[in-house]
Image (spheres, helix red, strand yellow):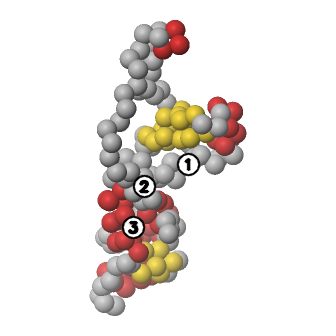
Amino acid sequence: MIIFELACTHGHRFEGWFTSADDFARQSGEDLVRCPVCDDAGVLRVPSAKVRVGKDGANAEPPRAAPAQAAPDTADAVAGFPAELVARLREIVRRTENVGHRFPEEARKIHYDEVPARPIRGQASKEESEALQEEGIDFASLPPFLLRETH
């Protein structure tokens, strides 16, 4: 396995594990390599900080063993965010009501006190989102990694 340092067009950095450079190129060409933070398929290899100098790394210090510690629970880990934070954010999202494509309608009802306030999530087109913003209705887009089920 080869570990590449990667970055999406939004600047999120993360690692990718591939069997070869050709495997990375093939997967990238098919949009299979995606940013774990924003789900962007515009992912490029970036220089790695793990560089050895000299012929075959002869002048470089040998790698040091990492201190012994318990393996972190990486089931909820996402590049750049502590696993505990991601797990907590996913739990908050799970506690919202998914109203699907009715999101703009439900958000308006809540905003204008037509129904009791409650945490909701769903989908809205770009036009619907702009209309909600013009009406002064506060909402935020959720990154795809918070919506993925991990269990």
Question: Does dot 3 land on a helix, a strand or a loop?
Answer: helix
Q: Amino acid at mark 1?
A: Arg
Q: Residues within 10 Å of mark 2 (few under 14, many from 20)?
A: few
The numbered mark, 3 or 1, whose residue comes first in the sequence reads: 1
Q: Residue furthest bottom?
A: 115
Quarter holding residue 89: bottom left
Query: Is 92 on the left or on the right of 51, as rendered?
Result: left
x, y percent for residue 72: 37, 53
The numbered mark, 2 or 1, whose residue comes first in the sequence reads: 1
Question: Does dot 2 land on a helix, a strand or a loop?
Answer: loop
Q: Residues within 10 Å of mark 3 (few under 14, many from 20)?
A: some
Is residue 125 visible in this depiction of the protein?
yes
Q: Amino acid at mark 3?
A: Arg
Q: Find disc 3 in the rendering and name its residue.
A: 90
Question: Does dot 1 land on a helix, a strand or a loop?
Answer: loop
> Residue at the location (53% across, 34% down)?
4
The numbered mark, 3 or 2, whose residue comes first in the sequence reads: 2
Q: Check the image and report above or below for 75 versus 90.
A: above
Q: Check the image and report above or below for 93 versus 60.
A: below
Q: Residues within 10 Å of mark 1 (few under 14, many from 20)?
A: some
Instruction: Give me the C-alpha separation between circle 2 and circle 1.
Output: 18 Å
x, y percent for residue 150: 49, 65
Q: Find disc 1 in the rendering and name its residue.
A: 34
Q: What label sits on residue 49 in the rendered view?
A: none
Q: Find disc 2 in the rendering and name its residue.
A: 74
> Residue at the location (48% across, 14% down)?
57
x, y percent for residue 7: 48, 38
- Could you say which is closer to the camera, residue 96 or residue 137? 96
> Residue at the location (46% across, 79% down)?
98
Instruction: Give me the C-alpha separation between circle 3 and circle 1.
Output: 19 Å
Is residue 134 visible in this depiction of the protein?
no
